[in-house]
Image (cartoon, helix red, strand yellow):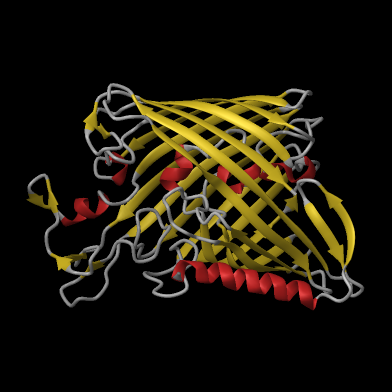
Amino acid sequence: MKKCIPFFIALFTLIASLQAQKNPELEKYEMGRGLRFETKTGATYRISGYLQPYAERKQLLKSDAPADIRFRMRRIRLRLDGTAANPKFSYRLQADLSGTGEELDGNSNYLLDAFVNYDLTKNTHITLGQRATYTDNRELFMNSNSLQLVERSRLTSAFASIREFGLFIDGSYRLSGSNYIKPYLIVSNGDGGNVFSNDRGGLKLGGRLDYLPFGLFTRFGQFNQVDVVRELTPKLVIGVTYSYNRGMSSRRGRESGAILYLDNNNRELLPDFAKLGIDFLFKYRGFSMIGEYVKTQAFVPEGISQRVRVNGTTSTSFDVNGIQDIPNYIKGRMMLGTGYNLQMGYLFKNKIAIDARYTHLKSDEFSFLNNATFYNRPNYYTIGLSKMFGRNYGTKIQADYTYVTNNGGINNNLGLPVSGNENLVRFIMSYAF
């Protein structure tokens, strides 16, 4: 029940916001972009959303375990965007009624976005609240209903923090001709979204710098994967990002208090976590290509002497291969290593798209990426086929197939080790209003 509270707060706020508007009138409706209203005071707001029924079949080769087949509602998003009578102020509230968010880990996170934005100048904006962070890989810039393939890449699963609460500053500046730069700065909690109490550790500081040599993308195409507008001239954005999270209490910065350590005086003492990323997006006449690289590193402070178990008790055991090794034990519970993702696709004029992706993860010697149940799978090869029913993301059908290689020690869905590789077939439908 406690996990539902943020959603009910969001829903109540949404209803109260609508009732507070003075004589709103429907200005227009565009499929996939929602209903846009305007009031006599000049305030505007847009109500939009989408739902995605989903199915998958996962089969480990050379395993006696049956295939794992799953049907579920992948996303049910409801979103409210608006501007105040003073257009310098805008806001967003977004909830996911499926409760799964992007993490795919079973967490019931209903509240996704809740922030207020202020236009400091025409080109500089300040945001306060919870939202997707600028220091994740580029794929996290993309709306979930605009993905080329059924799901985001394994790179995102391994390293992204998804959403955070904090202060976000972004800008867009023209250098000369068609050259633009877009800087982003963040100061956040560093513990993911939905942190309403027990915020652990220190702050996360980070930034991103994007360079666009050929001008801005059409209709915010920088934030969507498929080139539905069929860019008439080549469009490219290249970015670099870095973040440093002081005192992280989870594997990658998604959940506050998931993993805790203490010193001899029972005071919390947590490791730091750094992440470097380089990425790009290219679009031209229906063709799109994304490349991403991420490297993470941990810094374990001296003085840690205890770890907190799941049941709240403590232990002084940090066993690594029969040796008491505190730094490497701690690193073994974090997502440490490097990875890259390369994907491309082409949208034909009949709105059928073909796409392909290759993702590679390389774990550090001591890293949770070596975990046999969830990771320890270095290569992911994916091909996909999609059919879109308009020049937007209103309605589409997608299917893809992924071949996953075994790094010599993975477990099946019964927890038993197997030597074979893995097949994964996925299907999703999207309908946005």
How many tags in the picture? Answer: 0
In the rendered image, residue 167, in percent from the top left (x then y), is placed at 58, 68
Question: Residue at horizontal 45%, vertical 69%?
Answer: 1
Residue 170, image x, y percentages:
65, 59
Give x and y (percent) for residue 352: 71, 25
- Residue 146 seen: no
Q: Specify the farthest residue to the left.
A: 322
Looking at the image, residue 153 sits to the left or right of residue 225; the answer is left
The reply, left or right, for residue 52 in relation to residue 270 is right
Residue 356 position by quadrant? top right
173 in relation to 256, above or below = above
Which residue sits at x=62%, y=34%? 148
Q: Residue at x 45, y 48 (%)?
A: 104
Quarter occupied by residue 262: bottom left
- In the image, taking residue 263 as reference, residue 371 lies left or right, namely right
Residue at 17% in and 77% down: 265
Query: Observer-nearest residue: 230 or 418?
Result: 418
Between 259 and 290, the one lying in front of the other is 259
Residue 221 % position (x, y): 72, 41
Return the residue nearer the eye: 100 or 211: 100
- Regarding residue 2, the answer to whether it shows in the image is yes
